[in-house]
């Protein structure tokens, strides 16, 4: 961290836990799983920061206090005191247009380069702008609280905004905070890919998105490709002066830094979980493991078809190999996700019907959440992990799987080049999920790999074909690590 930084205000669509109403009418916290919470909660708790977000339910009385955590809570948010949490309350209809409409119906597919699935609707966009305004107002209150609590020389508070739900908030925060003479630094991190210009330009209000994000001092993405896409869009849509080499964009008389900040996992925690986890799966069979939210970006249908092709083309794996697919229910009230669930159910049924013998079924399919202990045990004991999304910002499963490889020989990771993790993890086997036959061959190769190769980086054309020539270190993605005030000369726009 730079020496003049004060406390952090984390702003995300959801708080790191959701609230539920118990039968007696009181509220209770339910911990949320996921990378953002695991990575960010310790930073906020240790630094006595504040978390601004939606609490997961609609309150009739917005002043109703948030409960403290349960004394038995062992999740990363257990130490987060309720007075360090500020919930944003939004009218349910507006929230639906913002969240299901604009965020998940437009930005999610568009930013994953699947424009055919994206809806463009002015009403959703208005709701998005309104909700971003509410988040900005709440963040200003958080800044005012820190200003009252902190002595004048204790450093500049860092507002750290997360993800595609809040791409307009930064500019509004900057304008109000400037008017009120509040000290602040603004950082934004996008957890999903930032698309290339040809995709981004399809969004009718793309200029406002860029202006919103450029309200920050620093904008972070998982990998350099997404940074370059963003810089490109700023230049082409807004006519900004940019510096591609140093990843800088000039806007409104300020220089905004764009940075690749690949998200990391708590590596030691996964090693310890793997060491302690009991054996859950029968290792007489080799397990090929998939762990994903049930989302169309994760390439699950392609994956099942690749596994079916493997069994067809390499019958030596029959009765010896099982695909264990864990799918976490996600966005279950959205039709596209319901359709995907149905397609998965049918496909699993068809493949199992085709190959099952009295002693063996090719696919074990768990639709639900599992504990981290169980997850670590699956990671540790699987022979192969399939991380084959069609598009993915990073993908934490790939990193968690590698951390849990304490067995000898270790399991083999197969990763898609279209995930941020595929750009970073060059020792893995690379597999294009769209190429079903080739994907089946990569799984075959992983299952039949000699032991010495399992511990050495692969050396072949298939990997080279997809690996971009980038070498980025994995680092905790704290935007503050890269902020300075030094002015930087920008090249003139051509
Ligand atoms: P997600 O799309 O949710 O995240 P991912 O990065 O794979 O995808 O993270 C999923 C997390 O959920 C992992 O930490 C995993 O352990 C956990 N998980 C998965 N299945 C589970 C199960 N059945 N039970 C319990 N926990 C489970 C978004 C982006 C990603 C980006 C992350 C972080 O889409 O590209 O890597 O944010 O920035």
Image: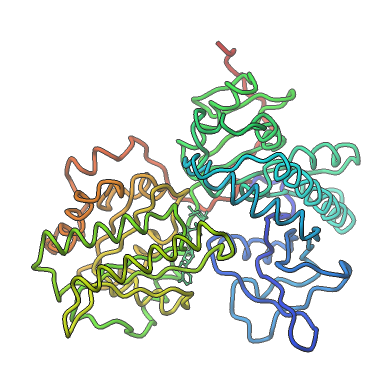
Q: Say which residue appears at 35% left-offset and 73% top-offset.
A: 365
Q: Tally the numbered discs.
A: 0
The residue closer to the viewer here, 241 or 209, is 209
Q: Could you tell whether 14 is left or right of 227 in the image?
A: right
Could you say which quadrant of the image residue 490 lies in? top right
Q: Give how far across and how far down residue 117 sits, in percent.
A: 51, 45
Q: Could you tell whether 356 is left or right of 325 in the image?
A: left
Q: Quadrant of the C terminus?
A: top right
Question: Furthest residue to the top?
Answer: 494
Could you say which quadrant of the image residue 484 lies in? top right
Question: Furthest residue to the left?
Answer: 316
Question: Furthest residue to the bottom?
Answer: 24
| Colour scheme shown | rainbow
* Vertical arrangement, residue 312 with respect to residue 258, above or below: below
Q: Give how far across and how far down residue 312 sits, in percent.
A: 14, 62
Q: Could you tell whether 95 is left or right of 332 in the image?
A: right
* Vertical arrangement, residue 255 with respect to residue 426, above or below: above
Q: Give how far across and how far down residue 445 sits, in percent.
A: 15, 57
Could you say which quadrant of the image residue 93 lies in? bottom right
Q: Give how far across and how far down residue 258 sits, in percent.
A: 57, 35
* Vertical arrangement, residue 482 with respect to residue 439, above or below: above
* Vertical arrangement, residue 87 with respect to residue 494, above or below: below
């Amino acid at each position: 961290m730079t020496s003049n930084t004060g406390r952090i205000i984390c702003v995300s669509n959801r708080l790191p836990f959701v609230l539920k109403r118990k039968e007696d009418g009181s509220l209770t916290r339910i911990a949320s799983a996921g990378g953002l919470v695991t990575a960010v909660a310790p930073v906020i708790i240790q630094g006595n920061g504040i978390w601004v977000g939606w609490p997961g339910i609609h309150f009739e009385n917005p002043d109703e206090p948030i409960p403290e955590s349960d004394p038995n809570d062992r999740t990363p948010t257990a130490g987060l005191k309720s007075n360090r949490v500020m919930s944003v309350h939004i009218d349910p209809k507006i929230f639906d247009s913002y969240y299901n409409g604009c965020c998940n119906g437009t930005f999610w597919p568009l930013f994953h380069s699947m424009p055919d699935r994206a809806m463009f609707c002015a009403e959703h966009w208005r709701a998005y702008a309104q909700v971003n305004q509410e988040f900005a107002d709440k963040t200003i209150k958080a800044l005012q609280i820190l200003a009252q609590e902190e002595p004048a020389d204790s450093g500049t508070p860092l507002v750290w905004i997360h993800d595609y739900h809040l791409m307009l908030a930064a500019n509004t925060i900057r304008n109000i905070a400037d008017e009120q003479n509040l000290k602040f630094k603004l950082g934004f991190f996008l957890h999903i890919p930032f698309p290339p210009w040809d995709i981004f330009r399809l969004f009718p209000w793309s200029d406002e998105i860029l202006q919103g994000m450029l309200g920050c001092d620093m904008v972070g993405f998982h990998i350099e490709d997404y940074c370059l896409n963003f810089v490109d869009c700023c230049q082409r849509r807004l006519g900004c002066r940019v510096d591609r080499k140093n990843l800088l964009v000039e806007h409104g008389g300020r220089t905004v830094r764009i940075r690749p900040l690949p998200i990391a996992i708590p590596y030691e925690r996964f090693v310890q979980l793997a060491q302690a986890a009991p054996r859950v799966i029968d290792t007489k069979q080799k397990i090929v493991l998939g762990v994903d939210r049930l989302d169309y970006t994760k390439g699950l249908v392609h994956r099942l078809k690749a596994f079916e092709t493997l069994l067809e083309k390499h019958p030596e794996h029959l009765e010896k190999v099982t695909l264990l697919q864990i799918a976490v229910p996600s966005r279950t009230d959205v039709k596209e996700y319901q359709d995907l669930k149905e397609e998965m159910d049918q496909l699993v049924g068809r493949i199992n019907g085709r190959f099952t013998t009295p002693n063996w079924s090719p696919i074990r399919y768990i639709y639900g959440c599992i504990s981290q202990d169980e997850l670590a045990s699956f990671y540790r004991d699987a022979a192969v992990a399939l991380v084959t999304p069609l598009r993915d910002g990073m993908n934490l499963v790939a990193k968690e799987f590698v951390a849990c490889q304490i067995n000898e020989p270790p399991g083999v990771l197969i990763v898609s080049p279209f995930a941020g993790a595929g750009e970073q993890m060059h020792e893995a086997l690379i597999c294009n999920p769209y190429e079903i036959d080739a994907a089946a061959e990569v799984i075959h190769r992983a299952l039949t790999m000699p032991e010495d190769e399992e511990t050495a980086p692969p050396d072949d054309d298939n990997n080279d074909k997809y690996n971009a020539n980038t070498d980025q270190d994995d680092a905790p993605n704290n935007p503050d690590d890269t902020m300075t005030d030094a002015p930087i000369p920008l090249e003139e726009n051509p």
